[in-house]
């Protein structure tokens, strides 16, 4: 029998990652002969260690915190999106002249778009984006790809300015979090990329008539913020569809098949409950 193809997710820590379960779910559904492992990789030598996994025979990798920049540096080639976002979450192995090298891509932004399209009932021109860290970059890139005008809010305004400049965003307003309530009150769409739930914090969104709110975290990290938003009239979505979307787009890059997203999302919601 042929050897299974080797895939995995690198992170630190990585035990909490749902990626192995999501990919194994599709392997089973589609009869794909592959193995997907969680690979805990310490910081410091991550760039070299990621390159070593190509030589060791891995066909593809996903990358989670804190290694998305190391993965970017480990690649011999980059997709246009990965290069502009400045982070890699999906690696595809290429064999060139007897060498095994990584092509780096980013499916966080396309995963976010899938999640956005599931929840939006009509096109939106203006969006409030909260946060200016690594996660915000992929989301901002996605929003820009849809031609949206962005109000960017971040605790550190300088970091928001850097993000806006580097991605050449169409900015309506750029300010700190003190203005959150006022800026969100009439917004049709608000996206939060700041994870405060693990430290017991939350964002409090004001009341809305018909706003859509997406928090790209899920589980405890997003629960309190989503609950308050929902009570105040927002149509809410957590980050699980984005997670499934980025996984599906990685799967498609590796196997050329778009796996069934909705059934994986249903399964993942059940895993989180148990
Ligand atoms: P990630 O990859 O999850 O985006 P990151 O790059 O470290 O992680 O970015 C964290 C984001 O959360 C930033 O926007 C950060 O704000 P600053 O740029 O001001 O640091 C924001 N953040 C983290 N903790 C926060 C807190 N307690 N209050 C407000 N914003 C916070």
Image (cartoon, rainbow, N blue to C red):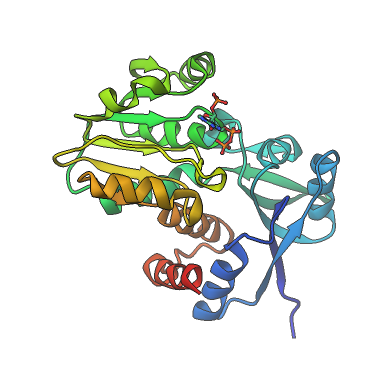
For ligand 1, give the image quadrant: top right
Q: Residue 174, how many percent across, how many down?
A: 38, 16
**Is residue 53 in sight in this rendering?**
yes
- The residue positioned 61% from the left and 36% from the top of the image is 87
Q: Nearer the viewer, residue 230 or 137?
A: 230
**Foreground pick, 18 / 196:** 196
Given residues 151 and 84, the one toward you in this image is 151
- Residue 146: name its quadrant: top left
Q: Quadrant of residue 85?
A: top right
Instruction: Give coordinates of residue 124: x percent, y percent.
Output: 22, 35
Q: Is residue 145 left or right of residue 44?
A: left
Residue at the (62%, 41%) spot, across then down? 88
Q: Position of residue 208 (x, y in %)?
A: 18, 38
- How many callouts does the rendering have? 0
Farthest front residue in view: 200
Image height check: is 110 above or below 262? above
Q: Quadrant of residue 189?
A: top left
- The residue positioned farthest toward the left in the image shown: 209
| Vertical position of residue 19 compared to residue 205: above or below | below
- On the picture, is 128 further left or further right than 19? left
The image shows residue 182, relative to residue 27, as above or below, that is above
> Can you say which quadrant of the picture contains the N terminus?
bottom right
Name the spot of residue 266 as percent of width and height, x first.
39, 71
Whether residue 144 can be seen here? no
> Is 170 displayed left or right of 269 in the figure?
left
Q: Give the residue drawn at x 31%, y 46%.
A: 228
Left/right placement of residue 68 relative to residue 54 reads: left
């Amino acid at each position: 029998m042929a050897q299974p193809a080797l895939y995995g997710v690198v992170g630190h820590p990585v035990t909490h990652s749902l990626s192995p379960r999501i990919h194994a779910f599709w392997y089973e559904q589609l009869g794909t002969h592959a193995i997907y492992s969680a690979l805990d990789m310490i910081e410091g030598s991550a760039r070299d260690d990621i390159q070593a996994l190509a030589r060791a025979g891995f066909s593809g990798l996903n990358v989670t915190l804190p290694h998305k920049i190391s993965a970017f540096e480990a690649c011999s080639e980059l997709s246009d999106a990965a290069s502009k976002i400045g982070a890699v979450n999906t690696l595809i192995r290429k064999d060139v002249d007897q060498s095994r090298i990584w092509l780096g891509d980013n499916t966080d932004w396309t995963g976010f778009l899938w999640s956005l399209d599931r929840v939006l009932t009509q096109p939106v021109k203006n969006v409030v984006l909260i946060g200016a860290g690594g996660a915000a970059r992929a989301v901002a890139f996605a929003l820009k790809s849809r031609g949206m005008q962005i109000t960017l809010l971040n605790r550190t305004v300088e970091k928001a300015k850097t993000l806006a400049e580097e991605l050449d965003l169409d900015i309506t307003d750029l300010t700190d979090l003190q203005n959150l309530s006022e800026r969100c009150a009439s917004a049709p769409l608000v996206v939060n990329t700041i994870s405060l739930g693990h430290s017991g914090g939350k964002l409090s969104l004001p009341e809305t008539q018909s706003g859509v709110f997406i928090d790209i975290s899920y589980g405890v990290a997003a629960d309190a913020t989503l609950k308050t938003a929902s009570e105040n009239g927002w149509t809410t979505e957590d980050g699980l569809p984005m997670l499934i979307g980025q996984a599906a787009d990685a799967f498609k890059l590796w196997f050329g098949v778009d796996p069934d997203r909705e059934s994986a999302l249903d399964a993942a919601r059940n895993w989180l409950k148990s």
